[in-house]
Amino acid sequence: MENQAASNNRSLKVILSIAVLLLVGTAFYTYSLYNESAETEKQLTEEKALVLKDLNNMAAQFDVAIGENEVANQKLVEARERIKGLMDSLKISENSVRSLWRYKKKFLALQQEMDVILAENDSLKVENVLLASSLDSTKVELAASNTFNDSLLVQNSELADIVENAAVLSTTGLKGFGVIVRTSGKLIPTERARRADKIRVCYTVAKNNLVEAGDKEFFVQVLDPQSNVLGLNEQIQFDNVMLNYSLISKFNYESRNLDICEFIEARGASKFEKGRYVVNVFDQKSLVSTTEFELK
């Protein structure tokens, strides 16, 4: 009986020893699992933070690219929104290897897409720069063309003014003198006032190819020594200028030199006075030529 009791005690001790060993082993294993789980959680948290950081950097790159465009590239905007959506989802996701790996795959896919979109965007920026440069060049050429056209208009206007101013008739060889008129019609020049029957005014209309041929007229004005207008002494107004003339010298201009002579009568039955006489020839209100002579 004693031997059996002793045997039972030994068996119980063995069982207790095994139980203690199992308990210690289980505790150690549980502790190890806990430490491993905590380390894994820490690593997953750090990995998650790194992915969020990468996504945030990627979003910042898109923000910069969008800000450089006056009109935002739609692909850039859509990609940035997908990045922000992925970031929001990752923040609330569970910390598991499977979950983190899924987000890493999405991040890598977005990174490849970002490289393509940003490359396209850089290409568009280069094209826009070239287009802007081309537009600036076109504006410069257009401005130069407008300046040239304006210059031509000014030159044409000036040329038209020159032509208009040059398209007038002039006279040469204007002279006035007294004449004795014989009954035969013969004219004898004289410087004697008491012997002069008329005053003769002669001039030559100079050729001017800019003036059209046709009927023309000048207004001849002869002033006696007292500045009285001899002849018709009639008035005509051109704009705001009033002209007293002695006669109207009418002629047919044929684009060549033309000699013209006119006669001026004395005032009433009186003879011509002694002194200095002035002869003026007007084309309307413009003085064409003038000369003087003296009767003694």
Image (cartoon, rainbow, N blue to C red):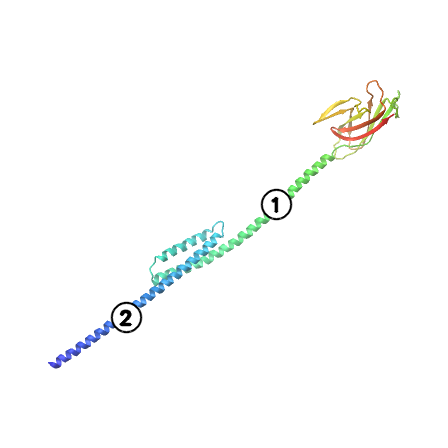
**Which residue is situated farthest in the bottom direction here?**
3
Amino acid at circle 2: Tyr
**Which residue is situated farthest in the top direction here?**
269
Structural crowding at the residue carrying mark 1, measured as other residues with C-alpha within 10 Å and reported as few (<14), some (14–19) or many (≥20): few
Question: What residue sits right under mark 1 in the picture?
Answer: 143
Residue beneath the point at 76% across and 24% down: 244
Could you tell whether 241 is left or right of 277 in the image?
left
Q: Which quadrant does the C terminus fall into?
A: top right
Residue beneath the point at 74% across and 23% down: 235
Corner quadrant of residue 231:
top right
Q: Is residue 48 above or below residue 160?
A: below
Between disc 1 and disc 2, whose residue precedes? 2
Q: Position of residue 240 (x, y in %)?
A: 70, 27
Number of numbered discs overlaid on the protein picture? 2
Of the pair 71 and 43, the residue shown nearer to us: 43
Q: Position of residue 183 (x, y in %)?
A: 88, 20
Of the pair 171 and 190, the residue shown nearer to us: 190
Label 2, secondary structure: give it: helix
Q: Position of residue 12 (x, y in %)?
A: 17, 76
Structural crowding at the residue carrying mark 2, measured as other residues with C-alpha within 10 Å and reported as few (<14), some (14–19) or many (≥20): few
Question: What residue sits right under mark 2 in the picture?
Answer: 29
Q: Position of residue 44 (x, y in %)?
A: 35, 63
